Image (cartoon, helix red, strand yellow):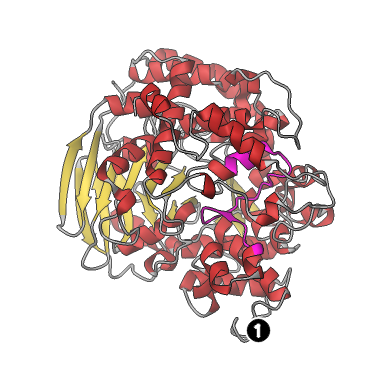
Amino acid sequence: MRCISAKVFDIDLTKGSIQEKQLPEEYWQLHLGGSGVAARLLYDEGTYAVDPLGPENILVFMNGLFTGTPVPCGCKMAVCAKSPLTGIWGEATVGGYFGAELRKTGYEGFLVRGKAQRPSYLLIENGQVSIREAEDLWGLDTYKTSELLKDRHGEKYEVAAIGPSGEKLVLLAGIMFGGSETRAAGRTGLGAVMGSKNLKAVVIRGTNPVDLFDRPGLVQSIQETVPVIKANTKGLTDFGTAGGVMAVEANGDLSIRNWSLGSWTEGAAKTNGQKIAETVFVSHYGCFACPIRCGKNVRVPVGPFKGQLAHGPEYETTDGFGANLLNEDLDVIVAANDLCNRYGLDTISTSGVIGWAMECYENGLITKEETGGIEITWGNGEAILKLTELIGKREGFGEFLGQGVKRASEQLGGLAVEFAVHTKGLEYAFHDPRAFTSMAANYATANRGACHLEGLTYFAEQGAFPLSLVDFEKEFTRHGHENKAEIAVIMQNFMEAMNNLGLCKFLIRGKDSTSPAIFAQWIHQVTGIPYSKADLMKAGERNFNLKRLFNGKIGITRKDDALPPRLGVHDKESGAAKGSIPYMGKILWDYYRIRGWTPEGIPGKEKLRELGL
């Protein structure tokens, strides 16, 4: 394979050793790259049996097959390990420029084992890796860490870093890339894994050319595709992902007041990407090889970093710190997002656990004495910012919230569990499965927990991605259950393949020009391997099942494939999703049958043989 070296670094921080490993090239043919190859490595290593915060857990950074190539939106890399937040498969995907820089080193990824004796960072320059002392960086936020490391090594070096939350093993901690133009490997607590290893940052620079099998053919295809992508993603270019808040609210898809309300029209009008453009917007930015450029730089209007330049909030953050908390103050949303990026927190889980705490406070399950005097009432901007800060520092009431909604609710018990919105311990991304019930199947079965991106089926149900491109032509209704499991299975397989290729999932807005058939063509043009649409979908299915096998070793079965009570039982009573409650028994029965799993949710032997697992 011309583009893939199949080489990785294997770094043991306990021993201080660095080895180069040549992996079988077939790994990339079977798994495509990214989290697929990472899953193969971690399953074979047996890390499903380790303590997530122990030195035996392995943290894998792995590029997708297209990462760092000219393929549009080929910018993503996967960070994977056993999750300390959920105790199961942990995965976070990140864009920016770090993955492209890794590709130019001539290596596809690196594994980090053990634990350094003192705070350290990794310096990767082409084929050389060194372990450097980082005691002077410990305690700094991610912006300052990136700034100092770029000053030390050069502006062209890319930096991945944890903030104070990762250092203090907050279970909501992520890994932040790109300094103030933040791209986050946010989900499943992998910043805490990095912190448990005394690893503050990774600094990387590559200068090697990226080889391609058929560069002229690939370039011609890209030139035909990019204008279509740009035309179909203009809203993202102009307003970022937060530009969709009003449309999401109109579909009944917005999380409002910890998922308890159905409509919030006036609030949504005050807290969206269009308002960001009118008020705090400074400039656009994009990831490597991206024609969309959905990133937005903003000026922080309030809070401890008022006046500073920062990354603008994405859709999930505007909902999480906005509608989810009944907060109409856009300035607070921007400031909370900035605090999360600086401290190294996942905005989805952080705002999710704050929403849960507000409902508990409202019902007298949490008192002002327990919060340290903070009145955590709905829409209280001052409380939102203070709680975010305390979670990031693991101080006071923030230490309790920083363990996530599952653990916190179980500690309180009783009614608090009813207010906890999670699946398998992961707080929900802010798209409501009652609005598009194929998302109920996706959330219940997604391998890392309540992840919208593992299926992205609400895109498909709205027509943003034509299901005919993945050979689905059956009828369905948004709130029904017929054929919803099949939509979830097909889209999970497709999204898994896109993830493994290192592609941003907004690329599917290109529709016919960015279909599975086109991606298969690009695989051949990049690697020289003949690849079909069927091969692509099969690779996605293989990797989805492989991660399910990882979770199965931990005991995940049908009992864990469930929606929380708030989403599976309660009617929103207003808005476009009024009256919709997913029929989970039927949906899951169909899902397991289509997957070739047992009624207990375990991949069947015949299916595993078919997939070569």
Residue 330 magenta: no
Residue 569: horizontal and vertical position, in percent? Answer: 72, 52
Residue 424 magenta: yes
Q: Residue furthest front?
A: 599
Residue 106: horizontal and vertical position, in percent? Answer: 26, 34
Q: Mark 1 — residue?
A: 368
User: What kind of element bears circle 1?
Assistant: loop
375 and 149: which is toward the camera: 375
Determine whether, in the image, residue 295 is placed left or right of residue 178: right
In percent of the image, x 71 and y 56: which residue is there?
Answer: 259
The answer to whether 421 is drawn above or below residue 509 in the figure is below
Is residue 486 among the parts visible in the rendering? yes
Residue 430: horizontal and vertical position, in percent? Answer: 65, 50
The answer to whether 344 is drawn above or below residue 479 in the figure is below
Determine whether, in the image, residue 199 is placed left or right of residue 398: left
Residue 469: horizontal and vertical position, in percent? Answer: 60, 19
217 and 600: which is toward the camera: 600
Quadrant containing the N terminus in the rendered view: top left
Quadrant containing the C terminus in the rendered view: top left
Q: Residues within 10 Å of mark 1 (few under 14, many from 20)?
A: few
Determine whether, in the image, residue 603 is placed left or right of residue 37: right
Going by the numbered disc 1, the residue's amino acid type is Lys
**In this picture, which residue range is highlighted in magenta?**
418-443
The answer to whether 102 is drawn above or below residue 385 in the figure is above
446 and 339: which is toward the camera: 446
Is residue 219 among the parts visible in the rendering? no
